[in-house]
Image: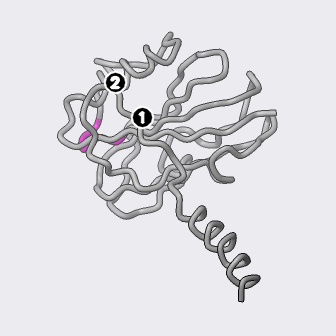
Amino acid sequence: MKKLKFLLIPLALLLLAGCAPRYARIYVGVPNNEIIQVFQPGRGQGAIYHLGENIDFRVQASQSGYLTFTVIDPDGTVYELERNVFISAGQMLYFPNANTQAGSLALVPPRGHHRVRVSFTSSQTDINRVNYVNINGESNWNNTIQSDIQYSNLRDVAETWFFIE
């Protein structure tokens, strides 16, 4: 009986680990509504990719709204992947897909740890008010996202990551 007990404990821990969220909720200075339920690269959070490979992301939200995808690379450069991608409540969205301008996302240098954020807003964000061009560093990234989402009634920000070898 003791052997069985010791075998069941690791099995239970493995099952619980599979239930853990695949993203981190990010607070950028404005309250979030905790709408994003799933956000991860196609191969899972922390997956290793190679230069030239394509990457995609899965997102699910509890409300209908719009998503903006931004990245900070290992050098601290921030860039926008896509803005105002519509998502329906409960839908599993695969980004990029046929409904976005992004096409496929082929990975380019620099190699290393890349962090990706998706911000959710209940209405489209204003591309004339906020853009992600020439943004460097974590604090500037946070401030830009805050400026982008602060006027939305519903908003949320989640982060995931991957590695490029």
How crowded pointer 2 is (Cα within 10 Å; few <14, some 14-19, many 20+) is rated as few
Q: 1 left or right of 16? A: right
Tell me which corner region of the image, top left, top right, bottom left or bottom right, holds residue 30.
top left
* Mark 2, residue position: 127
Instruction: Tell me, yes or no, whether the highlighted magenta stretch contains residue 48.
Output: no
How many marks overall?
A: 2
Kindly identify the residue that appears in the image at 55 percent across and 41 percent down: 160
Numbered disc 1: secondary structure: strand
Where 41 sits versus 70, above or below?
below
Residues drawn in magenta: 120-124
Q: Are marks 1 and 2 in contact (CB under 8 Å)?
A: yes
N-terminal of the pair, mark 1 or mark 2, is 1
Residue 147 coordinates in the image, percent (x, y): 29, 21
Which amino acid is tagged 1? Arg
Asked whether, in this view, residue 65 is left or right of residue 4, the answer is left
Kindly identify the amino acid type of the residue bearing the numbered disc 2.
Answer: Ile
In front: 154, or 26? 26
Quadrant of residue 73 within the rendered picture: top right
Res 83 label: 1
Mark 1 packing: few (<14 Cα in 10 Å), some, or many (20+)? many
